[in-house]
Amino acid sequence: MYFDTIVAISTPIGEGAIGIIRMSGAEAFEIIESIFKPFGKDPNEDKKMVYGWIMDGEEILDEVLIVKMFGPRTYTKENVVEINCHGGLVPIRAILSLLLKKGARMAERGEFTKRAFLNGRIDLAQAESVMDLIGSKTKRGYDMAMNQLEGHLSKRVRTMRDAMMNLMAQVEVGIDYPEEDIEDITYSEILESLSTVQHQVATLLKSANNGKIIREGLKTVIIGKPNVGKSSLMNALLKDSRAIVTDVPGTTRDVIEEYMNIGGIPIRLVDTAGIRVTDDVVEKIGVERSKISFNEADLVIFVLNASEPLSDEDLDLMEHVKNKHAIVIINKTDLEIKIDENEINRHLNDKRIIKTSVEKEIGIDLVENAISTMLLDDDLEINPSEIVSNTRHINHLELAHKNITDAMNATSNHLPYDFIEVDVKEAILNLGHITGESVEEDLLNNIFGNFCLGK
Ligand SMILES: Nc1nc2c(ncn2[C@@H]2O[C@H](COP(=O)(O)OP(=O)(O)OP(=O)(O)O)[C@@H](O)[C@H]2O)c(=O)[nH]1
Ligand SMILES: [Mg+2]
């Protein structure tokens, strides 16, 4: 495929010692040759750094190191040039505009990686893992992305897709040549192939929830009535005064999020506005947001105030907490205890209950331990290569699973082969969406549009 020449600043914008500009495409070499003056060394060796000047006519723009990389053994499979220049905004921008003047165009988000995909160096799932790699929040998330980049997920999906293609071919023979004396595949043979693939899809899906948590973090939401010490607990866990703490009930008005790391799993810790009935317009919105966060939570930390009797609001919250993965915190135990613990036990008997005094720094370590125990109980210690984490992949796997189940039902009921074929075809399409064998342009734009510039 012929592609025009794209260019982007590949390092973060701001002041740094060096900045890297990357250019890829049919005219990348021609353009750099027209503006680069090397000192001595032959600039035409593959992947060798060469020292010299970037010249705009007679004017020296910057002293740089450039690397030419000859396609197809490059990131995009095209000719690629990287320019290492001084890292301030002015030199980088000056060189960039010169390259644009010479005929390159600004790359769109993710366009280098998109070319790697379109030119067949990596498949779609691998391309997406590049973004995960850059965005990974812990070592374990990084390992998982690296595994996907190496193509482990793609290989498994492709095996399943191949099996389904095979099956479709056999089913089609039965449809197209019903009169011929060719040995048709039997219903029970179809069922056997389908159930093998169904099992493989199901196994992959089982890993999905864990994968998503490793990638995006375990959404851990702190909830409770106003003034029980939610923000204080958030700050204590983060070891940072991130959230405002006052003795005025209704202090926190908005949802506050921050990442922490427990045992290599990112925890997306969320502090919320205290839940109560209120006439204050701003606080009302805050309470609504708290409820939304609560519903989306993977784990809830429910905070109660030990120095007050349980209120109707507490009891109401308990009813909701019951059905969630939750840890119950009885805070302010440094004060006189007025809360009825038996009552709490009665309502939340299967939950872990921890007593703390955030003020006196008592019990914070117990909370951390409880979170990490819950992670382990949920079997998060799994091999990262066995994991699917991307929501898009999960959706397509779920659809494929449904297609296969439908095909199995049709087969069990001995429906005509056409009926089975429709579902098998859909399953092939859905599996193909993961690796990019079947894919539409707007989906591609959507995926690569989430990348950072210059990647
Ligand atoms: N005595 C005592 N006071 C505490 C403890 N934890 C928090 N507080 C105090 O309780 C008050 C409320 O704390 P916050 O952390 O702002 O409570 P909150 O639940 O975030 O409150 P809202 O944001 O209004 O919902 C502050 O004055 C804290 O200093 C504790 O363990 N013991
Ligand atoms: Mg608060």
Image (spheres, rainbow, N blue to C red):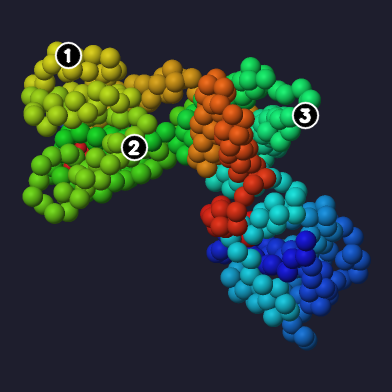
The mark closer to the camera, 1 or 3, is 3
The mark closer to the camera, 1 or 2, is 2
| Quadrant that contains the N terminus | bottom right
Where, by quadrant of the figure, is residue 174 drawn? top right
- Report x, y in % for residue 107: 64, 66
Discs 1, 2 touching: Cβ within 8 Å: no
Q: CA distance from mark 1 to mark 2?
A: 26 Å
- Does residue 206 appear left or right of residue 160 in this picture? left
- Report x, y in % for residue 20: 68, 62
Three-letter amino acid code of the residue under disc 3: Glu
- Helix, strand or loop for disc 2: helix
Is 327 in front, or is 93?
A: 327
Where, by quadrant of the figure, is residue 334 drawn? top left
Three-letter amino acid code of the residue under disc 2: Glu
**Neighbour tally class for label 3: few under 14, some 14-19, many 20 plus, Cα within 10 Å:** few
Using the image, tell me which numbered label, if any, was put on residue 180: 3
In primary-sequence order, the first of circles 1 and 2 is 2
